Image (cartoon, rainbow, N blue to C red):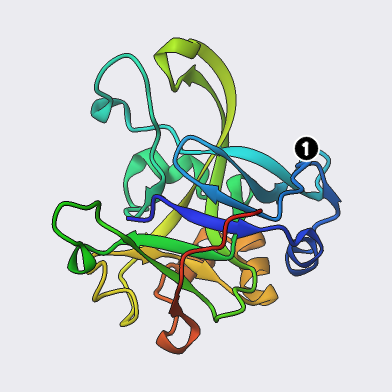
Amino acid sequence: MCNLYNVRSNREAILDLTRGMVDRSGWNEPSRDIYPGTLAPIVRVGADGEREMVMATWGMPTPPERIRGNYDPGVTNIRNTHFKHWRPWLGPECRCVVPFSSFAEPNPAAKVEGQRTPNAWFAHSDGRPIMFFAGVWTPWRGVKKVRDGEQDFELFGFLTCGPNNVVKPIHEKAMPVILTEAEEIETWMTAPWEIARELQRPLPDDMLVIVPPPERPK
């Protein structure tokens, strides 16, 4: 389950690969670690029909029967697209792509006794070019943190699938659904679900490597 990823500032590449028309995100950081409940750039179709990059909060609405307490921290990863809770957001109007440079999974095998479990980081290559998670988004009003009360949000999450042979030794259950080509992005953003769902598959082994943790901005 991916609950941490990093995105480097490369707005031109993001907009070019996604055929985005406008950047409304205001995002201009050289590198950002993204955790559940925090803001991150996504590319979606805006109200005017044009593709836009905006900032949204990571964590889709939780199925009501699974909420514990008086707040909803959200669901970051979506595996079971047959579940009725997710059906309203599977159409092209609710799909988005989520740019990233690398993503992390906890690596218990590398844990040193008495220390925290370290993360293994995955990227397309050592250069960490931009790739995209296949995501969905929705407007939502609710409580994410009790101290903040009810607020309006735009939320996103992304699909997962079985792991490839690079991720499986670290996380044997799942990996994010990753898109690397402009044609794949176009299919995800526009095609009927019967076609788009074919993209919910592991990235080929030769398109992912383990890399060091992202460098922190100085």
Could you say which is closer to the camera, residue 19 or residue 197? 19
Q: Is residue 91 visible?
A: no
Dividing the picture into quadrants, the one containing residue 140 is top right
Question: Residue 30 location in percent, x, y?
Answer: 70, 55
The residue lying furthest to the left in this view is 113
Residue 106's image quarter? bottom left
Residue at 62% x, 63% y is 191
Q: Is residue 72 placed above or below 55 in the rendered structure?
A: above
Residue kind at label 1, given as amino acid type: Ala
Q: Is residue 162 visible?
A: yes
Query: Tag 1's secondary structure?
Result: loop
Q: How many numbered marks, from 0 up?
A: 1
Expressed as whole percent of the image width and height from the top left, the position of residue 190 reads 66, 60
Residue at horizontal 33 percent and vertical 52 percent from the top: 82
Considering depth in this image, is 48 or 203 the residue closer to the camera?
Answer: 203
The residue at 53%/61% (across/down) is: 133
Residue 150 place in picture, x, y as percent: 50, 12
Asked if 143 appears above or below 171 in the picture, the reply is above
Q: Which residue is mark 1?
A: 47
Residue 92, placed above or below residue 183? above
Residue at far bottom of view: 206
- Displayed quadrant of residue 132: bottom right
Q: In what quadrant of the picture does the N terminus appear?
A: bottom left
- In screen coordinates, is 39 left or right of 162? right
Label 1: how many residues lie within 10 Å, few (<14), some (14-19) or many (20+)?
A: few
